[in-house]
Image (cartoon, rainbow, N blue to C red):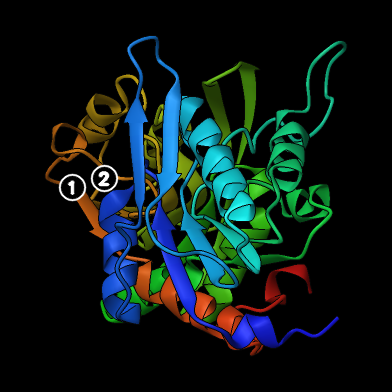
Amino acid sequence: MDDTFQRGPMLLLSGRANRPLAEEIGGILGKPTDGATILDFADGEIFVRIDRNARGRDVFIIQPTPAPPSNILELLLLIDAAKRASAARVTAVIPYFGYGRQDRKDQPRVAIGAKLHANLVVTAGADRVLGMDFHQHQIQGFFDIPVDHLYAAPVFTRYFLEKGFDDLVVVAPDVGAAKMARGFARRLGATFAIIDKRRPAPNESEVLTVVGDVDGRVCLVTDDMVDTGGTMAEAIRALDRRGARAVYACASHALLSGNAVEKLSAAPLTELVVTNTIPVPEERRFEKLTVLSVAELLARAMKYIHSNESVSQLFELRHEEDE
């Protein structure tokens, strides 16, 4: 197949899930992102219309898919509209991939929501996906189309390197976050520790012990997301009890559900650093919260995809965490 269309004009479209991020990406690329009309009918149905010429163009649709589920449907409708408008290629840019925690059948008679979500994106007509910090790496294999999986780690490591810590310990809040934490530790020249915990019920966690030397040290707790804040808050308290001098935390996706803000505000936390893959409304912001932008990282990836260049040059961590 002649792939010269991939070097044709770029068209950026944005859903309503994170318009500020889309506009920031558009500003970096010098492209408008207001090319679609999206409305809600009185009965709750979503209406989507692309207002710019999409025929033969390389279309990028920017839409994270946190709750409510209408964000997923909005993404699917935008993809379908672009394909029906004769777009040459459609890339779904999904900074946060919803239902990513439902990635396996770990108990009887449960759905694998992450796989269903991936199937829907492919069936709608997406030609490729650009995502960031999937909850599990295996989600890339759920898609039957090319996936470029970015990490927010370069943004975080740059931020924490500027702080100049010389006694930093990177802490994984559970076994699942160990690979990510190990990669951070290598980049930051830090040592590594892990929290040993069990989860008695969904969205509840009980810390058992800290494995590693944290006494008198600056600790950085890393995770891919912070949802209800329970795991993060318990990890922070455990480190404080073990004598940590200061506790920082970072998470790519700031869901901050329920009373997460209250939990984290009350914890002995110095600073929580997140990214803007999901918009953080003013009522969810608190004194200890810092929001970093991933717009430049996503914009560069989109530029490389459009010009058929390698996106792997953006993977500062590459596969170090798997070594």
Mark 2, Cα crowd under 10 Å, few <14 / some 14-19 / many 20+, is some
- The residue that mark 2 highlights is 269
Mark 1, Cα crowd under 10 Å, few <14 / some 14-19 / many 20+, is some
Identify the element where label 1 is drawn. loop
Position of the N terminus, as image quadrant, is bottom right
> Quick one: 297 or 169, which is closer to the camera?
297
- Residue type at tag 2: Leu
- Residue type at tag 1: Lys
Q: For the point 47% across and 34% down, which residue is it?
A: 71
Q: Tally the numbered discs.
A: 2
- The residue that mark 1 highlights is 288
> Quick one: 305 or 263, which is closer to the camera?
305
Q: Distance between the residues labelled 2 and 1?
A: 8 Å
From the top left corner, tell me how far across and down residue 107 is, in percent.
84, 16
Question: Could you tell which of marks 2 and 1 lies nearer the N-terminus?
Answer: 2
> Quick one: 238 or 317, which is closer to the camera?
317
Is residue 211 in view?
no
Could you tell me if the residues under marks 2 and 1 are in contact, i.e. CB atoms within 8 Å?
yes
Q: For the point 42% across and 58% down, which residue is it?
A: 13
Disc ID at residue 109:
none
From the top left corner, tell me how far across and down residue 280 is, in percent.
26, 42
